[in-house]
Image (spheres, helix red, strand yellow):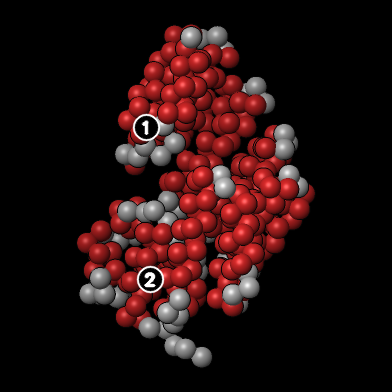
Amino acid sequence: MNQPDFSQIGQVIRELREALGLHQQDLCKGICTQSQLSKIENGISLPQSTTLYMISKRLGIDVNTLFEYTTTSRMDYVLEVEALIRGYVRKKDYKSIREVVLREKQSPIFYKNHYNLQLLLWHEAISIYYVDQDSERSLMVLDEALNLTRSTSSYYNERELAVINSMAVIHFESGNYEEAVEIYREALTAISQVPKDLYSDKIRIRLYYNLAKTLFRLENYSGSIEICQKAVCLCIRDETFYLLGELNYYIGFNYVKLENNLLAKEYLEKAKGIFVLTENHDYITYVDQLVK
């Protein structure tokens, strides 16, 4: 059995961070200084055990999996596959996602590693829903994906929360709004019960955003606004545009439904300004249609 190569820990951390689209400051927040993380990633110093534990959890994996990645020369291939799948997700090319998943499930680097297999099952479930319109089977596969790693931790890591988010999205897309709300609230409660620095704020923002959209569909406009505002506060605190435009859009849309035209206009204009900056042309069109 290969022994972990501790000298490669920093490289593995950097590659996983970049694959997740995280900046150094996102990963090290509340764990260590950016300077310390930079030294770890560059192999200048080794992380303390507690630091390594917190970093691995924020990356969404356990420490053992992190060590496993130091023993395989094919880790870069796993990250390439993950990046390929993420690209197809952004394009909503679910048939291509299925093709990648079916091909890679035959590879021992995936089927012999629970964390890697979880990635494939998670996205296989997404393709099942959008290609086959089979919500029941999709949810079964998502549950299978989640259970692959549940025995290794007493709480959810970020990957597991992303899988749970997908479960709620499937319920939302299927019109099962109450079930979706319950899942989102359970996930947010789970996050609140562990040290806040263990998770990046992106997962909180995404869960808040999706919960707010679901409450909007349930015509709970005041509740939707409240949830959006919580997410907006996180965006402002972290100085990120992540879903900030969409959140302001939904606040404005809720005020449209509440017939508060003054506040509706204020938030829709905020949203449009962000969409212009981020070149989100679809949402610019949505805003223009609402303010007519």
**Pointer 2 residue:** 12
Disc 2 residue type (three-letter): Val
Q: What element carries label 2?
A: helix
- 10 Å crowding of disc 2: few (<14), some (14-19), many (20+): some
Relative to 8, residue 233 above or below: above
Direction from residue 216 to residue 7 in the image, left or right: left
Disc 1 residue type (three-letter): Glu
Res 251 seen here: no
The image quadrant of residue 101 is bottom right
Direction bottom: furthest residue: 1
Relative to 103, residue 239 above or below: above
> For residue 91, which numbered disc appears in the image?
none
Relative to 208, residue 285 above or below: above
- 10 Å crowding of disc 1: few (<14), some (14-19), many (20+): few
Which residue is at 57% across, 13% downward? 258
Which residue is at 52% across, 36% downward? 209
Place of residue 68 in the rendered image (x, y in percent of width and height, measured from the top left): 48, 78
Distance, label 2 to label 1, CA atoms, is: 33 Å
Place of residue 248 in the rendered image (x, y in percent of width and height, measured from the top left): 44, 26
Place of residue 49 in the rendered image (x, y in percent of width and height, measured from the top left): 38, 73
Direction from residue 17 to residue 86 in the image, left or right: right
Direction from residue 26 to residue 183 in the image, left or right: right
> Do residues under tags 2 and 1 come within 8 Å of each other at their CB atoms?
no
**Pointer 1 residue:** 279
Q: Earlier in the sequence, mark 2 or mark 1?
A: 2
Res 147 seen here: yes
Relative to 12, residue 268 above or below: above
Which residue is at 46% across, 27% downward? 283
Of circles 2 and 1, the one toward us is 1
Which residue is at 39% across, 23% downward? 272
Q: Is mark 1 on a helix, strand or loop?
A: loop
Direction from residue 207 to residue 129 in the image, left or right: right
